[in-house]
Amino acid sequence: MNPTRTERRSHRRAASHARLQEERQQPLPTWLATRTARRALALLPAATFAVGVLAATVGGGFALISALTGLCAYALAVLRRATRMLDNVPEDLLDEREISDRDHAYRRGFNLTLSLLGALALLAVLDNVLAQEADVQLLENSGWPVLVGATFLTASMLPAAALAWTWRDPMDEADDLDD
């Protein structure tokens, strides 16, 4: 008898959950296991935005934004791995503490994203005022798409970075209790 579409979907979901749980249970590499390393990784979005501003002001934007996109994808994967993919796991695989940590990180990431967009809007207004009053532009017209792209990439990293900044691995807590 052929399984129905719902049965196949349910089987795939169960297999996916099992793979996620297995990945989450693997020990972290030693260079990712410390809180200091996670906090250092949490600063990657700031570096991403700084490189985006540099690319927007200096020029050569497409090559830099392409490199920045690759770097961001790698950084996001490392940030998620450092927090055991807590921001990417279905809720039914998490305990209450993990759900609470993830929700707090999403709120912090949202507030950081709003701040980032506010800074971008202020920069646009300042650029417009300077262009009208002093005939000086902070960014050339070709720089704005690069800066908006860098802002988007940075915003995509903020929830994972907020989680990496505050998250404490239960394994770390168990080690502290043993000492």
Image (cartoon, rainbow, N blue to C red):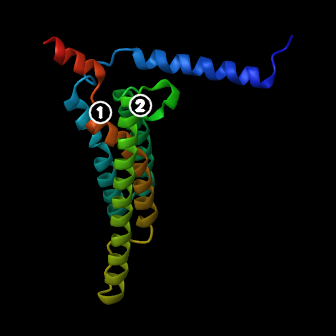
Tell me: 42 left or right of 89. Answer: left
Q: Residue at x 36, y 34 (%)?
A: 79
Side of 15 where 33 appears, left or right? left
Percent x, y for residue 54? 31, 58
Q: Name the residue rendered at 40%, 54% in the picture.
A: 150
Residue 59: which quarter of the image?
bottom left
- Confirm whether residue 30 shows in the render: no
Residue under pointer 2? 86
Q: Position of residue 164 (x, y in %)?
A: 31, 36
Disc 1 packing (10 Å; few <14; some 14–19; many ≥20): many
Which residue carries the number 1 mark?
A: 167
Q: Are marks 1 and 2 in contact (CB under 8 Å)?
A: yes
Amino acid type at circle 1 is: Trp
Q: Quadrant where the C terminus lies?
A: top left
Residue 138 visible in the displayed image = yes
Give the vertical position of 150 relative to 25 (above or below): below
Residue in the foreground of this view, choosing between 175 and 165:
175
Extreme residue toward the right, this view: 1
Q: Residue furthest front?
A: 96
Q: How many marks?
A: 2
- Left or right, residue 6 beside residue 125: right
- Type of amino acid at the residue the image marks with label 2: Leu
* Secondary-structure class at tag 2: helix
The answer for how far apart the CA atoms under marks 1 and 2 are is 10 Å
Residue at 31% in and 89% down: 133
